Amino acid sequence: MPGRCPYGGVHQNYLPQEVKDKFTDEELYYFLDVIVEYYANSGILDAAPDKDGYIEIDQDKIVDYVVSQARKDKMGDFAAEDILWVVRASWNTGSLSERKIKPDF
């Protein structure tokens, strides 16, 4: 049920079809857990916002972290360009809705 699943479903609405087809719901849940872990442990959300209220986020660092953790956790080897789509889509799930994010793209 794509519309009912908060990450695997709604999240997939922000992914191109060719990227969607590469991942299972389990993998998408895993990626989002790792992304949230990165935010929680990196201190990035504690950063002072700029004059417009935004915080800078280096998406390449998040992608590298997810790819590295997936390899470490034996989830698989994933292409950075595919994980980049997942990282960008995660910003649209509402999990960071209270923060203004200024990604580096």
Image (tube, rainbow, N blue to C red):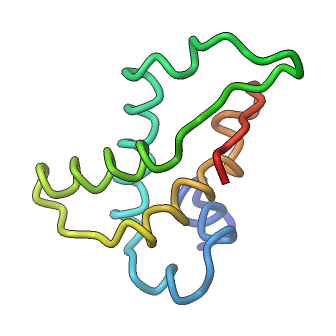
Quarter of the image where one finds residue 42: top left
Along the horizontal axis of the image, is 79 left or right of 83?
Answer: left
- In the image, residue 73 lies at what x, y percent? 13, 50
Q: Position of residue 101 (x, y in %)?
A: 72, 35
Above or below, 2 relative to 59 = below
Residue at the spot 38% in from the left edge and 32% down from the top edge? 37
Toward the viewer: 43 or 11? 43
Taking the image as shown, residue 101 lies to the left or right of residue 85, namely: right
Query: Which of 105/27 is in front?
Result: 105
Residue 18 drawn above or below residue 41? below
Picture quarter with the C terminus: bottom right
**Left or right of residue 99, residue 25 in this image:** left
- Please tell me which residue is depicted at 57% across the width and 20% down the height of the picture: 45
Quadrant position of residue 17: bottom right
On the image, the x and y values in percent for residue 15 come to 61, 73
| Residue located 37% across and 21% down the image | 41
Nearer the observer, 74 or 59: 59
Whole-percent x, y for residue 90 in the image: 59, 51
Instruction: Relative to 8, say whether 70 is above or below.
Output: above
Q: Residue at x 46, y 16 (%)?
A: 43
Viewer-nearest residue: 26 or 48: 48
